[in-house]
Image (cartoon, grey):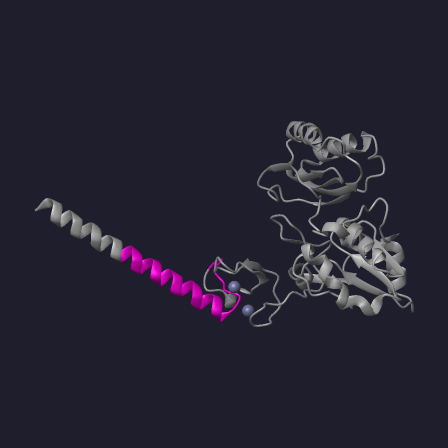
């Protein structure tokens, strides 16, 4: 049995390098795998380990000054959700690339709404809009019914979503993301851009799903580890699959990366639409380009072999 913990905290870290060393030591001693990003603005991590080691780590984290109220989200692991332990110092704990528009979520951020409150809102007549702050491929395999997905394929493009949701400036908006960390800046960004009534889902979708499995959040939750997607009580008949093969539209939850290296798009592809095990192209153009590349590589290789043969023949004679 393995457990996974997901957490983040925006707080002032004076010496990220030192924090990294301390965290690495404790994680190694507890045999944890996963990743942690540390920046002067805070930390963001997810670890997998034996349940008693995960709970020891959580005790350690909660005992640190400033971390007493850190929100920890748990899910079931596989024992191989992460290939290794990676603890790094970066500039930001989530790349928002806001540049001069960057903000400190401990000062400016959306109001928190709990999963319980959001559940009540969804099942009431209240007018509000859920804005999904995740990437398009995450949304494709699971999302809140009726949520708005601004068309941006990476959180780094946060800046570009404003024109798409401008019409919600005077409405009540609830931002959502996996565990909540992206919403800290995203909701603050909306507040800074004169959105009047901005909430963020406290604890993220993972918390909502845990409390209200197979209800308003349809499908599965995309996660950035080897599980790829996760759900709670997915054997319940109320669980719906909503992921669709990008090519034929049939229901599927299997992700692939476009085999054409220069594309590498991440998308859902059913087994029938793959060119082989883990070989799939997002469109015909990618397939053609890739096959042409393989052909020219083979041609170069055969040319090379001809030269070698020629050279051998000449040197022998
Ligand atoms: Zn298909
Ligand atoms: Zn492609």
Q: Residue furthest left?
A: 317
Q: Main secondary structure of the magenta part?
A: helix
Using residue 205 as the reference point, say whether residue 36 is left or right of it.
left
Task: For residue 54, say whether it is visible.
Answer: yes
Whether residue 85 is situated above or below residue 205 in the rendered picture: above
Give the tally of numbered discs.
0
Task: For residue 215, say whether it is visible.
Answer: no
Asked whether 295 falls inside the magenta stretch, the response is: yes
Q: Residue at x 85, y 62 (%)?
A: 173
Asked whether 94 falls inside the magenta stretch, the response is: no
- Which image quarter is the N terminus in? top right
Q: Residue furthest right?
A: 125
Q: Residue at x 78, y 67 (%)?
A: 165
Using residue 297 as the reference point, say whether residue 275 is left or right of it.
right
Whether residue 267 is situated above or below residue 22 in the rendered picture: below
Q: Where residue 51 sits: x, y (%)?
A: 71, 36
**Which region of the structure is painted magenta?**
277-302
Q: Where residue 155 sits: x, y (%)?
A: 69, 55
Q: Residue at x 71, y 38 (%)?
A: 39
Q: Quadrant of residue 43?
A: top right
Using residue 219 as the reference point, say whether residue 301 is left or right of it.
left
Whether residue 149 is situated above or below residue 87 in the rendered picture: below
- Nearer to us in this view, 159 or 34: 159
Q: Where residue 314 sits: x, y (%)?
A: 12, 49
Q: Residue furthest front?
A: 100
Whether residue 173 is situated above or below residue 46 in the rendered picture: below
Q: Where residue 163 sits: x, y (%)?
A: 76, 67
């Amino acid at each position: 049995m393995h457990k996974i913990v997901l957490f983040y905290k925006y707080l002032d870290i004076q010496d990220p390098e030192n924090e990294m060393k301390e965290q690495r030591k404790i994680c190694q001693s507890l045999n944890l795998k996963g990743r942690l990003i540390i920046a002067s603005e805070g930390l963001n991590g997810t670890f997998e380990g034996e349940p008693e080691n995960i709970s020891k780590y959580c005790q350690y984290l909660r005992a640190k000054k400033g971390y007493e109220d850190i929100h920890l989200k748990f899910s079931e692991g596989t024992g191989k959700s992460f290939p290794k332990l990676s603890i790094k110092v970066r500039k930001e704990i989530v790349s928002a690339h806001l540049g001069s528009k960057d903000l400190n979520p401990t000062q400016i951020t959306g109001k928190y709404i709990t999963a319980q409150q959001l559940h009540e809102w969804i099942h009431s007549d209240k007018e509000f809009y859920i804005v999904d702050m995740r990437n398009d491929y995450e949304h494709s395999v699971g999302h809140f019914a009726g949520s708005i997905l601004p068309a941006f394929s990476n959180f780094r493009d946060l800046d570009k979503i404003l024109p798409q949701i401008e019409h919600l400036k005077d409405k009540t908006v609830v931002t959502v993301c996996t565990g909540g960390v992206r919403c800290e800046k995203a909701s603050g960004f909306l507040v800074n851009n004169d959105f009047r009534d901005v909430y963020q889902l406290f604890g993220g979708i993972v918390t909502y799903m845990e409390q209200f499995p197979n209800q308003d959040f349809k499908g599965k939750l995309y996660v950035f580890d080897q599980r790829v997607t996760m759900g709670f009580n997915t054997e319940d008949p109320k669980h719906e699959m909503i992921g669709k093969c990008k090519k034929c539209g049939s229901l599927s939850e299997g992700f692939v990366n476009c085999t054409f290296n220069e594309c590498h798009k991440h998308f859902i592809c059913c087994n029938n639409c793959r060119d082989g095990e883990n070989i799939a192209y997002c469109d015909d153009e990618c397939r053609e380009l890739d096959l042409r590349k393989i052909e020219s590589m083979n041609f170069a290789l055969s040319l090379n072999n001809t030269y070698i043969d020629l050279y051998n023949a000449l040197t022998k004679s």
